[in-house]
Amino acid sequence: MPRRERYELIFADPVALEPEAEDIVMVHRTDSSGPGGHPVYADDTGIVRAEISDREEVRMIASGGHQVHASMVRARPVA
């Protein structure tokens, strides 16, 4: 199965006043692999980085010191 080139990462705040409040970041595939052996995807700035498995499981990867990642992140494929 070919890997997708782009995803939207959807960040949801479980304690937000509006349950549907989400932040969406577009990421594209890089040449790197993450600790689980899956491709790493990054936004255009390189600050948001995530390893996304073939089952669309997301593992955020720190791109700098003192980053704290949201606990609820989903990946949605982009055609």
Image: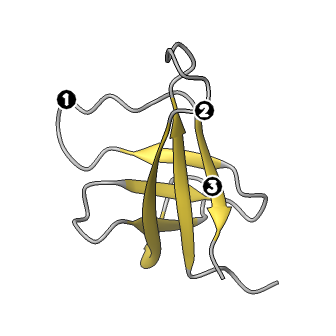
Q: Position of residue 62 (x, y in %)?
A: 32, 44
Q: Could you tell which of marks 3 and 1 lies nearer the N-terminus?
A: 1
Q: Residue at left 60%, top 64%?
A: 38
Mark 2–mark 3 CB contact (< 8 Å): no
Q: Is residue 21 left or right of residue 36?
A: left
Q: Amino acid at mark 2?
A: Glu
Q: Could you tell which of marks 2 and 1 lies nearer the N-terminus?
A: 2
Q: CA distance from mark 3 to mark 1?
A: 23 Å
**Is 29 drawn above or below residue 26 in the view shown?**
below
Q: Could you tell which of marks 2 and 3 lies nearer the N-terminus?
A: 2
Q: Is residue 5 left or right of residue 26?
A: right
Q: Where does label 3 land, which residue?
A: 75
Q: Nearer the viewer, mark 3 or mark 1?
A: 3
Q: Amino acid at mark 1?
A: His
Q: CA distance from mark 2 to mark 1?
A: 27 Å
Q: Is residue 79 left or right of residue 26?
A: right
Q: Where does label 2 land, which residue?
A: 20
Q: Nearer the viewer, mark 2 or mark 3?
A: 2
Q: Residue at left 48%, top 65%?
A: 40
Q: Residue at left 66%, top 60%?
A: 76
Q: Where does label 1 land, which residue?
A: 66
Farthest-out residue, front: 18
- Other-residue count near label 3 (Cα within 10 Å), few / some / many at <14 / 14–19 / ≥20: many
Q: Amino acid at mark 3?
A: Ala
Quarter of image, res 1: bottom right
Tag 1, which secondary structure?
A: loop
Q: Position of residue 25 (x, y in %)?
A: 42, 57
Q: CA distance from mark 2 to mark 3?
A: 16 Å
Farthest-out residue, left: 65
Tag 2, which secondary structure?
A: loop
